[in-house]
Amino acid sequence: MGIAYDGTAYHGWQRQKGVRTVQAELESALSKIANGAVTVNCAGRTDTGVHATQQVVHFDATVDRTSKAWIEGTNSQLPDDIAVVWMKPVSSDFDARHSAQARRYLYIISNEKRRSPIGPRLYARFFRPLQPQVMHKAAQTLLGEQDFSSFRSAQCQALTPFRNIHSITVKQQGSLIFVDITANAFLHHMVRNIIGVLEQVGAGSKPLGWVEDLLQMKDRSRAGKMAPASGLYLINVIYPDQYQLPDVPELPHLMGLLSIN
């Protein structure tokens, strides 16, 4: 299944006791349609407040339902801020996490001097003027397989700090700045830490070469403030062609009139 959600009201993706999570809401809804307990596995666990337009999950079910029944039935049991976007039967060797070849995230920054009350949950605010061209140039230092120790959280449980960033672009449309980043996988808080660094370079607080310096330092404490969760979206998960899953990114609705693709 492809799942979309506004993560504002949730304590992240992963099921946890005593707090609302996206996984718990989805499993509860699916279990009603499946007439039995359902456990889902996702492509990538998103943090508290992070959104998704195309999270991918897989699960096993003992009942046969049409795609329409799975989608519409599950959506009828979900809260308004979570929705099933698509559904497709897959072979038993498919795994939402381990079969994925890459994940694509989009980060949206509202770069205005004045505070707008419209959509504060859907983007991050940065009030000092940013130079997106400078941010884009600095970001190219991050391409390829590298040690991202300076961009991982202290709580990160990954066995290795090495990740491979396939592409990263910074574009501006009006007062909004979009950072589009694709990698084989991401460390805990890696994208938000990257955004925090690029904002400092874009605002002129740090030089262009600071990004490369941080990579060499391998020290998270030298990288500065992490960007807020509100601007971050998981927009695509890429799989081998054999599974025939959607490979076109689902962009946030607020971008419907923008020329980002």
Image (cartoon, helix red, strand yellow):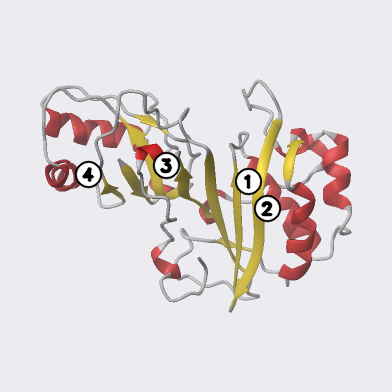
Depth order, front residue of 173/80: 173
Task: Name the residue tied to disc 2.
Answer: 195
Q: Are there few (<14), some (14-19), or many (20+) residues within 10 Å of tag 2?
A: many
Tell me if residue 261 can be seen.
Answer: yes
User: Can you give x and y, in whole percent of width and height, for residue 82 in the image?
Assistant: 30, 48
SS category of the residue bearing label 3: helix
Number of the front mark, 3 or 2: 3
Asked if residue 184 lies left or right of residue 37, the reply is right
Q: Is residue 92 above or below residue 108?
A: above
- Looking at the rendered structure, the kind of residue marked 1 is Val
| Residue underneath mark 1 | 191
Tell me, yes or no, whether the two marked residues, 1 and 2, touch with CB atoms within 8 Å.
Answer: yes
Q: CA distance from mark 2 to mark 4?
A: 32 Å
Label located before the other in sequence (4 or 1):
4
**On the image, numbered disc 4 is attached to which residue?**
78
| Mark 3 or mark 4, whichever is nearer to me | 3
Q: Quick check: marks 2 and 4 in contact, CB under 8 Å?
A: no
